[in-house]
Each structure stands twice: as structure tokens, then as C-alpha cells.
Amino acid sequence: MRPPAEAIGTLALIVGAIAVAIFIGVEGALVYAVWRYRTSRVSTPARFDRNTRLELAWTAAPALTLAVVFVLMLGTLRDIGAATDAQLRIRATGHQWWWEFDYSGIVTANEMHIPIDTAIDIELASVDVNHSFWVPELGGKTDMIPGQINHLRLLTRRPGVYLGQCAEFCGVEHAWMRIRVVAETKEDFDRWLATQGSPATASGDGARVFQSNTCVNCHAIRGTSARGEAGPDLTHVGGRATIAAGVLPSDAASIRAWLVDPQRYKPGAFMPRVPLSDADLDALASYLGSLR
Amino acid sequence: MSAVPLWVARPAGASAAGWLRTVDHKEIGVLYIGMGVALFALGGIESLVMRAQLATPNARLVDPELYDQLFTVHGVTMMLLAVVPLLVGFANYLVPLMIGAPDVAYPRLNALSFWLSLVGAIVVYFSWIAGGAPDAGWFSYPPLAERAFAPGPGVDYYILGLAVNGAGTIIGAINLAVTILLMRAPGLRISRLPLFVWMTLVTSFLILGAYPALSGGLVMLFVDRQLGGHFFDPTAGGQPLLWQHVFWFFGHPEVYILVLPAMGMVSEVIPVFSGKPIFGYRFVAASSVAIGFLSFSVWAHHMFAVGLNEFETLLFSVTSMLIAIPTGVKIFNWTATMIGGRIRLLTPMLFAIGFIAMFVIGGLTGVSLAVVPLDLQTTDTYYVVGHLHYVLFGGTMLGVFAGAYYWFPKMTGRLLSERLGRWHFWTAFVGLNLTFLPMHWLGVQGMARRMWTYAADTGWGPWNFVETAGAFVLAVSMAIFALNVVRSLRGGAIAGDDPWDAFTLEWTTTSPPPPENFRTLPAVTSRRPLWDRKHPEMRDAS
Amino acid sequence: MIARDVRPAAPALDRTILGMFLFIASEAIFFLSIVVAYLASREPGLADARANLDLGRTAIFSVALFSSSATVAVANARRDVRWLGATMLLGAIFLVGQGSEYARLATIGIGPSSALFGTTFFTLTGLHGAHVLVGLIALAALAAATTRRTRGVGPITWEAVSLYWHFVDAVWVVVFSVVYLGTFL
Ligand code: HEA
Ligand code: HEA
Ligand code: CUA
Ligand SMILES: [Cu+2]
């Protein structure tokens, strides 16, 4: 089966061409009528007012056109939607306003890695309101609706970074709910997954600050006692390209800035400002940045 | 023949109390139109603020909370509080005149419907000063619209306001339907009804079928929010999707409620300004009925991404595509009406032609949305925003302007200026394409709708800037129209009874019409009674 | 030209009656949306419904409401205020019955917020009850207007009010079937 984006692209070209043809026909007729029958060229208007055959014809012609479009659509539909050929399953869960990705127990956030040339079944869930998972270059979107699991088939042949966006309005920070998908070779992907599966270090100043503050109520860092679930898993947060679903780059300086005042960068974000000394902030930021 | 504007020459005196008490269908029509214009201006101003915020990436002109309120109230205003009253107002004013009746079937109920509609709108707008406007989108999907996620009072004002407004709209629709069915002049058979009246009749039935479903949904949302209910609460077994089904069962017919009357206006204007009877009257009328029925069977095309099963997906895709057929019939018949005619390109006709030209674009993008795989790419993006504004601004609003220029002389006794009219048209035409065309590219590139801002690295900045510029061109255009109306009321050219050499009954009475509408009524033996009177030697066959 | 004759074509159907039909049609859609919601939420609430609804007692009150359709028909045929009174009595019995069912459910902790079943049950039956109440008010107004010989209360008003009452009754046929019979059969 084809990559969904490719299948949709082909269909879009065909439907687009048909639409353009109709557009030219209709607008052309309109312009012609205005030009040909303007007042200065006609003294007495004609009086005809029906032609049943013609009218039946222009009822039937669109019907036939649409029948063709419908049949073409059936073919495309098989390449999208739920993957029957899935070789990998990822659970994606929407949160206000970040993403959780679960690779059979290995949890990460906001940045999804996928192997190329592999059909993937994304299971879509939500813990709060409706969201919608959409990475345009990988295919169509499917909603995440609390209380049900939807499926989306992903498949790409080109390695690269694909950007996406939560598409269903989900509250004040809907705009800052971006997705980053990294498509890589099977080997790179396996290496990445192995890294994600490994625990983080629990030693050092930063780790101590983290564990002695409210951070642990909301965030998990595997290998430490932090098991919170209200915010993104931070086990390998430094290894991601961005934090807070695409708001800031994931380096120690940006993380520090984020910790000082999350709402400055993402006004609606549900992460509170945790008052910390400068020294603690430095330690914390460099610790988190080092979690690769 | 009276040449003085209606609102100067009111028999009851132009007092405020007179307007409050009036049960005359023409005055209620004017009230409705006034309400529609005011709310359209409010909705337009909201859209200008949104456009200003979106003009550049990472802007902080408004905060996200305010932005969410803006698009929600903009959507609610335009879809329910502005354009429906505008269209109902025209229908109220014109239907009795076009069918040769002295008034609507229930004049008092008519006043009640107007006041309910207005109070509903006021309730929605009151939220701005009472703790926050609704902010969950015009279709307020739960769980986001539930108390847990929208704790403020905004959604409650939305529920209450729309319920009251809807009650008014339903009563108004009953009134119009009964008027059309039972109060026609002798000889004015259903098969001779002016097409505007036809389409108003279909619209009334759409309202009767659709609005009560919205009321039902609102009651459920109210129970959830105020009585702790669980209709849409997935944590207690409720289903968020239930709301979507109920809402769109209303919401889809609603969009045809918004376009059919405008199509009716265009169907009156095009024949008159082509000097020819409408081509294929029966097809045009029948296609409205077909659209009416079909529009109740397509609602889930707003839900292709929610995980429908295959049968539902295909079913709703097919029904949505089918709607293109009767709509195409209309487009083709209007064009065929112009062919062979003698086209007077006056302002009403300009707008009517603009309607066809722009509506086709919106219709074609609509069909592309009915093609499920394409919808999965474009749903909830600016592509849909582009689609909806082409059909609603490029379609409905241009149609309403066509109707406004056409009937303004009948309502006030004075003509609008042609020169300002042309400026109004061309600025609207340019403005709307600048504003709404780039939305299609942005949507395909990944710009979701309802984003209060976007990152600079997306590259969406330039097109957004163009759109904002276009929106301000539209604002200028609307201001030109306002100017035109004000100047013409003060001292526009006297219109006379029949300034356009028109066909239908409303042009046989004075401009503005007397309280009882008609002193004499021509015999109706065909679809063009006034034409028959003016050209007895060339009477239409019945 | 027909001078001065602006009367409409002779109506085959009275306006008030046609208007009432259209109003009832829109009300039917309103109830339909709630009934659909009830059915869509049926599964998760079924156990609660089975355990807590009282079919037998409600059936008796329902008979009162159903027979009121007959009394209103007689009242309408004879324009007889006494039969209107009988109709109102039967309607009131129904409301009292429904009230007692509500009270019983409340004592065992079931309300609109207790669980999904409570939400859907109270919304659907409550809306119907509210319509019965409105119907009773209409009947009372008709009775009062007739005894006081208010002008404008003619056969059409009788017709329209009884149409509405029949509708309220018919809705209960659906609600009773869906909520009660549907749970136990
Ligand atoms: C006046 C209002 C109006 C009108 C007339 C239409 C007309 C149509 N609309 Fe549109 N629509 C909206 C207002 C309207 N819409 C709004 C407001 C929304 C968004 C709501 C929201 O989410 O906020 C929406 C959204 C919307 C969606 C959901 C998108 C999404 O959210 O994912 C879909 C999907 O199928 C759709 C389809 C259609 C179709 C098939 C038509 C058809 O009726 C169009 C038919 C017309 C033509 C096709 C052109 C003329 C025909 C011919 C020249 C004949 C030849 C043509 C062919 C053979 C193709 N519309
Ligand atoms: C009939 C329907 C209608 C109409 C006419 C319009 C008109 C306009 N709309 Fe609207 N729009 C919707 C229906 C409509 N819209 C709907 C349903 C939505 C979806 C909402 C949602 O997502 O929930 C939407 C959403 C929407 C968005 C997307 C928001 C988002 O998703 O984030 C945008 C953004 O650009 C927009 C812009 C505009 C603009 C610029 C106009 C312009 O055409 C407006 C032009 C009018 C004016 C500029 C007013 C002029 C007035 C004056 C100058 C004042 C003069 C004063 C006096 C005379 C008293 N609209
Ligand atoms: Cu999550 Cu929008
Ligand atoms: Cu639709």
C-alpha cells in the first residue's frame, strides 16, 4: 500500500484538475454572457425560458463527474485510515497542550520518531478534550477523542523532520501544540528507541533540585523517583529538539528560561512557575539539558 | 406615490414606542434588517481584530483567551445572529408584497419572533461585559465546552442566547411558511411563486427541521453544565460525539438556510436585469427542494476525522457530493438566463454576477471537502475557513447586497447611488479574494484554524499579511455601502414604483408601500404579473 | 385587474391549524434529538434503569395520560368545558405520578448528576413533563376563556389546543416505550 500522503496527493491533483476545468467552464460562460449580451450589443432580449433536454444534460453531467471522483476516492481510502499492514504500533495521547507518545511502554513527549518504509498504526487517545493529530506531509489527520481510540496509518519513504500541528481546537494553547516527527532509517530508529528505553541518571545537583520540588508531582524521569503524569515525561528531554510542544529549543538556556516563567512563552500552559533560586535553576536546567 | 423614506413617513409616527409596538410586517422586516446590519458590523469588527492579530507571526496584540472569544463570537454572530435576521428581514418585508398579501399570517407572533431573536443576540453579547464571552468555537464541542474545561460563564450565555434566538427563528419560520402556503393572491399558484418566495419557503422548512435539534443539543449541554449531567462526559459513559451529531444535524442545514434566500434574491435580480424570464423555472425551484432534503442527510461530513466507520464515511461522502448536482442546476440556469438577454450591468446585477462567480469557487472547494481523503488533509484548517467564507461572503453576502440594491428603492422610495455601488462592489470583490483565497494555500500547508498565533518558522507570515490587508479592504467596502445608504436616505434619487422595469407584484405598489400593501392588485395569470400588465401584447403563457 | 380585492385565495386549511401542525413538527424534532441521545446513552445506563425504574406504577399513570387524549377529543367535539376539566384532571394525575417517581428516585440517590442514566432519564421525562404542564395551562386558559366568553375563542382554538394535547400524549407513547418498555422488554 502507498504512503497515505502520496495517495492523497494524487487524488488531490485529479480532483483539483476537474475543479479547475469546471471553474473555467462556468466562469468562462459567465464572462462570455456579460460581454456578448451587454446592453450596447442587444436591442431586444430573446424570450426563451426552458430547454428540458439541456437541463437534464446539466443535471446528469455533474452526476457522472462525481461518480468518477467517488470511485477514485475508494482506491485512496484503502491507503489511509487504520493500518491493516502495521509493523509498528505507537500510542499517541493528546493532553492540553502537549503530546505523549508511548512505544509499548517506552514513553516520550512531543517528538515522535518513526522508521521509514514501515507501516505504522498510531493509536490516538486523549485524556481531556478533543485534539487532532496532523502532520500534513505524512497524511491526513484523525481526531483524538476522550473515551475512544482512533487509528491512523503512517508510512513514509523519505527520512527527515516533519512538522505537524494539533488541528482540533482544544483550548487556549491549541496554537502551541505542535508535533515534530523524525523519520529515520530502521537502524537509527532502533538506536533511538534503545536510548529512550534507558533510564536517566538520578545523581547531581540538578537531579536533587528536581526531586525536592513539586516537579515530581507532574513529571516522570525514569531511573529516579519522579513518576508524575500531568506533564511530559522528561527522561530524555534534552535529546528532543524543542520543549513545550515547539515553543522553545531544548537547550539548557531555553529550559532555564522556560522554568523561570512558562507563561511568558506559552500563556495558557498548565505548568506553574516554581520559585527557585538562581543556583537551583542553573543546576536544574543543565541537568535537564543533559538528559539526552 | 410617496417619495419619503419609510422611517420618516411611518403612519404611527417615528417614535421609539411605535417601533416597539409595531406588528406591521414591513416595519418588522426593517427591524430585522437593522438588527442584522448591526450584528454584522460587530461580527466584522471582531474579525478585523483577529486579522490584525494574525497579520504577523508571534504577535501579542490580543492574548489567546481573547482570541478564542473573538472567533467564537464572530462565528456565532455571523452564522446565527447577523445573517439569519438579515435574510429573515428581507423575507418578512418582501414575501407578503411578492405574493400580494396584506401582511403575514400572524402579525403579532411576527413581532414576538423578532424580539426573541434580538434578546437572544443581546444575551450572547452581554457575556462580553459579564465575565467573559463564549470561547469554545461556534460549534462548542464538548468536552471543551463542558464546565470542567470551560468554567467561565461564556458557554452558558451561548446556550441561553442561542436557545432564545432559536425560538424566535422557529416561530418566524412557521409564520413565513403559513403565509406563503395560505395567503397568496388569487391566481398566484405555487407554480407561479417568485423564486425568492420559493426559496424562502424551503428555508422555512429547513429552519423547522434544523433549529429544534440545536435546541435539543443546547438543553443537553445545559444539563451537563448546570445540573452536573453526563451527556457528553466520557468519564461517566457519555459521548462527546453525540453533540457533534446533533449539532451538525442542525449545522449543515443552517448553512443552506444562510444561502438559499440569497440564491432566491439572485434568482429575482438576474432575470430582471437580463430582460428575460428565468431559464428553467421548474428546475430552479425543484433544485431548492432537492437541496432542502439532501441537506438533512450530509451532516457527518463535518466529522470525517472523528473515526466514523467505513459505511458512514462513504454514505456521507456520497450525499455531500449529491448536493453539488441541484446546486449546479441553479448555476447553469442563471447563466442560461443571461444568455440571449439584454444585460443591464447595474449594481444589483453586478452583485448577482459576483455571487455566481464567487459561490462557484466555494462550491467547488466544498465538493473537494466531501472527498474524504482530501477532507482528512484539510479539515480543521484554513482551507475550510476559506471554503466557508467563499460561500458565505462571496455567496450569501454578495447575494444580500444584490437584494439590498434591488429592493432598497421599494423600501425607501429612493435609489442608491450607482457610482458608490460600483465602488462598493469592486472593493468587496477584491477584498474578499485577497482575504479568503490565500487561506486555501495556508490550510494545505498546515495552518490549522483557530490558532491565536503561529511561529515565524512556518513561513505563513506573508500570506497572512495579505489576508489581513484584504480584510481591511473589506472594511472600507462596507463603509462605502454604509455611506451610500446614508446619503441616499438623506436625498437619493426618487425611485418611483418600478425603477428596474421588474416583473413581480411588489413593484406594482408604491415605494414605499402603504400600510395595507396594495390598493389594487393586477390579475395573476403567469409568473410575471407586472410584465403582463406592462406588455399585454406579449403576455407570458401561464 | 381586480380592483380593491386583495383577499387571498380561499384557504383550504385554517392558518392557525397549519401553524400548529408546523409547530408540532418542530417540537417533534426537538424531542427526537433527546430521544436519540437517550438511546445513544442506553447501554451504559441500562443496569441502572433496570434496577430503579418502576414499570408497573408508571404504566398506571400513563394510562391516565393516554385516556386524556380521548377526553380532550370529546371535549373538542362537544366544545364542552367539563370534558376539558376531566382532561386536566387526568393530566394532573400523570404529573403527580411522575413527581412521585422522581421523589422515589431522589430518595435512592438518583438525580440528573448521579450517573449517565439519571442525566438522560430526567432530561427526557422532565422535558416531557414540562410540555404536559404547558398543555395543562393551555387547557386551563381555554376553559377560562370559554366560560368567560372571551371574543376570538372559536372552534379553531379548541382544535389547536386539543391538537397540542394529543401531541404531548403521543410523545409520551414514544418516551414510555423507549424509557420503560425498552428497558424491561
Ligand atoms: C452558505 C454556506 C455553505 C454552502 C452553500 C456550502 C456548500 C457546500 N459545502 Fe460547506 N461549509 C460551510 C458553509 C457552506 N457550505 C461552513 C460554514 C462550513 C464550516 C463549518 C465549520 O466547521 O465552522 C462548511 C464546511 C464544509 C465541510 C466540512 C469541512 C470540514 O470541517 O472538514 C464539507 C465537507 O464535505 C462541506 C461541503 C460542502 C459541499 C459539498 C457543498 C455544496 O453544497 C457545494 C455545491 C456547489 C457547487 C459544487 C458549485 C456549483 C456546481 C456546479 C458548477 C456543478 C458542477 C460541479 C461538480 C461536478 C463538482 N462544507
Ligand atoms: C456569514 C458568515 C461569515 C461572514 C460574513 C464572515 C466574515 C468575515 N470573516 Fe469569518 N467566520 C465565519 C463566518 C463568517 N465570517 C465562521 C462561521 C467562522 C468559524 C468560527 C469558528 O471557528 O468558530 C469564521 C472564522 C473566521 C476566521 C478564522 C478564525 C480562526 O479560525 O482562527 C477569520 C480569520 O481571518 C475570519 C475572518 C473574516 C473576515 C475578515 C470577514 C469579513 O468578510 C468581514 C467584513 C465585515 C466588516 C469588516 C465589518 C465592516 C463594519 C464596519 C467597518 C463598521 C461600520 C460600522 C457601522 C456602519 C455601524 N472569519
Ligand atoms: Cu490540541 Cu488543538
Ligand atoms: Cu456541511
Image: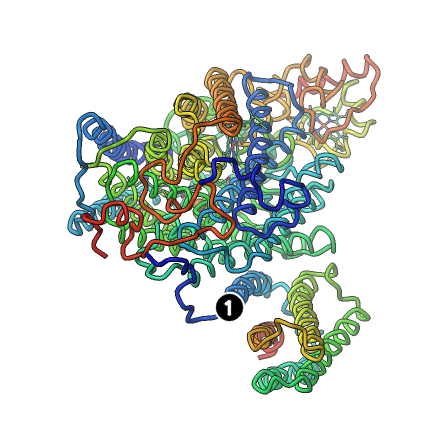
Q: Residue at 58% across / 25% down in the picture?
A: B50
Coordinates of residue B117 in the picture (x, y in percent): 61, 48
In front of the other: C134 or B405: B405
Image height of A55 relative to B135, above or below? below
> Residue B186 falls in which quadrant of the image?
bottom left
Q: Is residue B533 left or right of residue C72?
A: left
Q: Is residue A103 visible?
A: no
Coordinates of residue B180 in the picture (x, y in percent): 43, 58
Image height of B379 relative to A251, above or below? below
Coordinates of residue B56 in the picture (x, y in percent): 55, 16
**Quadrant that contains the N terminus of chain B:** top left
> Residue A233 falls in which quadrant of the image?
top right
Here the colouring is rainbow
In this rendering, the count of numbered labels is 1
Q: Which residue is identified by label 1?
A: C21
**Quadrant that contains the C terminus of chain B:** bottom left
Amino acid type for the residue under numbered disc 1: Phe
Image height of B114 relative to A208, above or below? below
In front of the other: A75 or A207: A75
> Residue B331 falls in which quadrant of the image?
top left
In front of the other: A155 or B339: B339
Coordinates of residue A182 in the picture (x, y in percent): 49, 25
Q: Is residue C147 left or right of residue A112?
A: right
Q: Is residue B204 visible?
A: yes
| Mark 1 chain | C
Q: Is mark 1 on a helix, strand or loop?
A: helix
